[in-house]
Image (cartoon, rainbow, N blue to C red):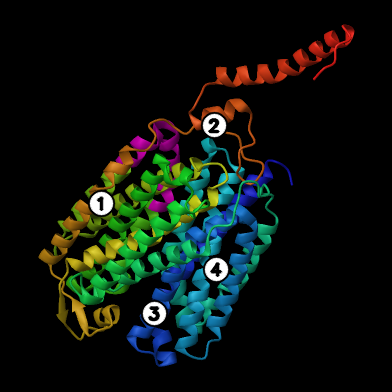
Amino acid sequence: MTAASRPRAALLASVAGAMIVALDGTVLLVAQPDLQRDLSADVTQVQWTSTAYLLAVAAFLVIAGRLGDRYGHKRLLFVGVLGFGAASAGIAFAPGIGWVIGLRAAQGVFGALLQPATLALLRLVYPADRLGPAVAVRTAAIGVAAGAGPLLGGVLVAELGWRSVFLINIPIACVIAVLTLSVRAPKPSPAGFRQFGLAAAAVFAATLAVLVHALTGVPAHGWSAVETWLGLVLAVGLAALLVRLERRTAQPIVPPAVARSIPVAASMALLLVTSGGMFGALFVATFFLQAGLGLSPLAAGLRVLPLTVMMVLGAPVAAAVLRRYGPRRTAVAGQFFVVLAVVGLSRLGPDGTWPVIGGAFALLGAGFTAVMVTATGTVVGDAPPGYAGVVGGLKQTAMNVGPTLGTAVAAGMMPLTPSTMGAAGAGSGSGAALAMSGPAMGSALLTLAAFTALGLLPASLLPASPLPARPVPRDGGRATASPEVRIADRGAGTALAAAADRLRNWWAPGRVRSSLRRRRRAGERYR
């Protein structure tokens, strides 16, 4: 494989791996009612088919990225996608709802293995100044998959039943596995890597699982429920224990080089807040369009369609803006668009026209895409050498926890009322529905707008200038560049200091040889 074809193969494998995950999540939403009828499951059990997957993914993303840094991201992508396909096959032939829930959890574990690898592969084969276009292609592909998922799921369920939405993953997974084998990625170097502690890994996974479980229960129970508070307190306690374990271990799960990187930390916070704001707004707006305005699911979906269109069309534009104006300006502008769009949605009422509603969603998609491309490119491009996997895992964790947090914030502003509405009751699983009215929607969306505006702070902490060109790592992400590049990357010197180092290394051996020759001529013994 030529040097030019290697990045293309890695990009194709990365895009395909990201798309299968996005596609699986959206088609399942359409298949759940048919699944419930076929397996005679109750609403809570059906809800757990999504919750089990989400908990597993959130718990193991960072750990999977850390393993990829050690054993190779190509290997983890291969194992992850094959396991994802195998779990999908098991779900398709599952005899009962219990099997579906258990296999969905297994599918989430394999999904956690492949997701950080899809980003890390891009970091390994693309220099930092060329990451933007690659990330834009990946973002646009995710938008296509998310937008096509409900349509594809509806066709499959109507013609072949709910099991077909999982059967379709099998050939796709096999194709991605073949693509992965064709990727020529640098081999990881075990030098300097020591196995992280199992105790810290277990606490890390438990912390994220408890936090996500507590947040997913907010729409059903509310923020003031005992279950919610117990889950949040337990998550805080586990997080404190995790910090203590991380400080005492020589090989933490999140290395200090990653934890202390301002661009990485700012990008994580920005993705968390922005994804929370957007998905929370979608949660409220979808309820309002269907329950408040009485639109059908298809009509409501058509009004949201401009968001997906702008995610696809806006990704290459965002990459070009990022190269021209740098991460900080691009992220701030994108975040401002997201806030403005959420505020605009809060002003909608029963007399809202299709162009007005579509325009608000289009603005939301454009802003979110700008933030997504910028933060992803920054966090992957600024990843310390050797830690592309763990950084990719942190990024994916933010993208999983953020929507859950945003939905919880939105649901907390929409009071629960007794109802027998099928859709709302199915969403809560408790016979209660979210109250929906114009004032309730406006209040919830304004709260989400204020929450989303918090992302302007981390956006302002991103680098002001475009990412400089840096060589592609050749040993799995660890530094092998010349002294000039290493010193420039650390920000601890200049090219002049590097040149002095090289001059000293070149000149010193000759000086020693000259001294030896002089001593031998004088008959002296060299010690």
Reading the chain from its start, which is encountered first: label 2 or label 1? 1
- Quadrant for residue 354, please give it: bottom left
Residue 171, visible in the rendered structure: yes
Mark 3 residue type: Trp
Marks 1 and 3 sit apart, C-alpha to C-alpha, by: 28 Å
Residue 377, relative to residue 51: is it above or below?
above
Q: Position of residue 199 (x, y in %)?
A: 48, 65
Callout 2–callout 4 Cβ contact below 8 Å = no
Left or right: 127 in relation to 180: left
Relative to the observer, which residue lies in front, 244 or 4?
244
Q: Residue at x 48, y 75 (%)?
A: 105
* SS category of the residue bearing label 3: helix
Q: Is residue 85 magenta?
A: no
Marks 4 and 3 sit apart, C-alpha to C-alpha, by: 18 Å
Marks 1 and 4 sit apart, C-alpha to C-alpha, by: 31 Å
Q: Position of residue 132 (x, y in %)?
A: 49, 41
Q: Which residue is mark 4?
A: 110
**Image quarter hosting the C terminus:** top right
Mark 1 residue type: Thr
Q: Which residue is mark 1?
A: 452
Q: Main secondary structure of the magenta part?
A: helix
Q: Which residue is mark 3?
A: 48
* SS category of the residue bearing label 2: loop
Relative to the observer, which residue lies in front, 252 or 343?
252
* SS category of the residue bearing label 4: helix
Mark 2 residue type: Ala
Q: Which residue is mark 2?
A: 469
Q: Residue furthest bottom?
A: 40
Residue 276, relative to residue 87: is it above or below?
above
Q: Residues within 10 Å of mark 4 (few under 14, many from 20)?
A: many
Reading the chain from its start, which is encountered first: label 1 or label 4? 4
